[in-house]
Amino acid sequence: MMGRGLPELSELATSDPEWRTRLRATFAKELYGPIPAPPDRVEHKIEATTDGHHKITLSIHCGDRRFDVSAALWMSPKTTAPVPVIVALDFLGPFGILPPGGFPADPAARVYSAPEWQAEGRLVPGLAGQSRPRWPLGLIAEHGFAVMVSCYGSWVPDDAETWRDHGVSPLLNHPNTGAISLWAWALMRMVDVAVDTPVIDRNKVILAGHSRLGKAALWATAHDNRVAGLWANNSGCAGTALSRHLVGETLAQLTQRFPHWLRHGAVTNPDAMTVDQHQLLALCAPARVYLSEAEEDTWADPEGSWAALALAAKAYGLTPPSVIPTAWNSGAFGFHLRPGGHDVLMQDWRATLKFFAKNL
């Protein structure tokens, strides 16, 4: 079911150099709030560890204010030349990817309080290693990629009551923006580190994210021309799914459940919006864009994501299939739809790595 007619992508057919700036400003006004300006400087230290990863400590400075946060970098020990890197936020970060004792827990981090975790939003010892199935580090290295990951809750607490109290929020002047914009800002700071690290190919930086973190990776890619690729997995409403495709989660439901994600006063009636997510996907080009969806994940609306991607591809002169495919690769855009539900599976990684290995 589709709401009122979709906004045009006619801007792409003109020589107007301001269409990107205009669209970004409209998305900021209607949905996300603006991404804050870059900090005065980002310093980082990379330390090798005994178990194969590198710990990164970032120090971010805005005037006399400073924020420290950690990340981890994995790459094949056989690396002899600059390699492409996948940069991502994870729900538990390196603490959740490595086994117990492998990475220190950030006591200030506040993550989503999943009932099955019974952790009240904190990185308790029992969560160490819980993210590992979503991060097949060996497979990633075999395909020639490095991966850099940080915990999203260290940057911005995923809690409607406390999200302004910790992390980067006190560092920044960000009137009326939302957590998705701040997570996007965090990804851009990780890109700062990636392009300044000699072992990484600065021309092959990919942003990746699952669910709400896919929304943040999409919004960041639309702003950062250093990003060569985007992978959004099951990102749904306010991610890659059309707001006017009235299937699964709606903007009104999202803002009721997670009022801190979008800007205060975000448009929640799709018919009142002047933009939609196909335009945001178009903004990401010339970065290569890959979407992965799941048949049973109707809440994230895989058909709405395909419709948005198809419209964006058409604006760049491509001819996508008229119905949702199980797989599609145009070189500039890629997509797959797999069996199963809302998760990141080995199948998603295999297809995504194959796409970027071929098309970056």
Image: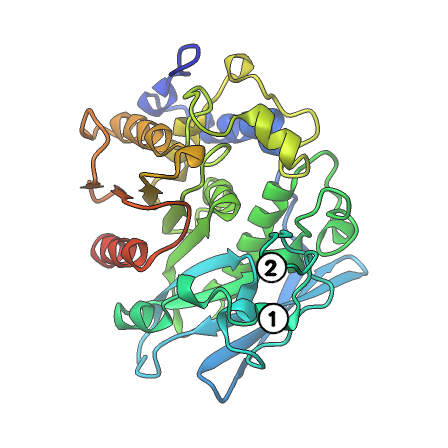
- Location of the C terminus (image quadrant): bottom left
Q: How busy is the neighbourhood of tag 2: few (under 14 within 10 Å), some, or many (20 plus)?
A: some
* Residue under label 2: 117
Q: Is residue 299 left or right of residue 262?
A: left
Q: Amino acid at mark 2?
A: Trp
Q: Secondary structure at mark 1?
A: helix
Q: Amino acid at mark 1?
A: Gly
Q: Is residue 298 above or below residue 196?
A: above
Residue at point 63%, 76% (across, down): 104
- Is residue 1 shown to the viewer in this render? yes
Q: Is residue 60 above or below residue 7?
A: below
Query: Foreground: 38 or 357?
Result: 357
Query: Foreground: 154 or 20?
Result: 154
Q: Is residue 98 above or below residue 328?
A: below
* Residue under label 1: 126
- Residue 171 image offset from top left, x and y in percent: 76, 53
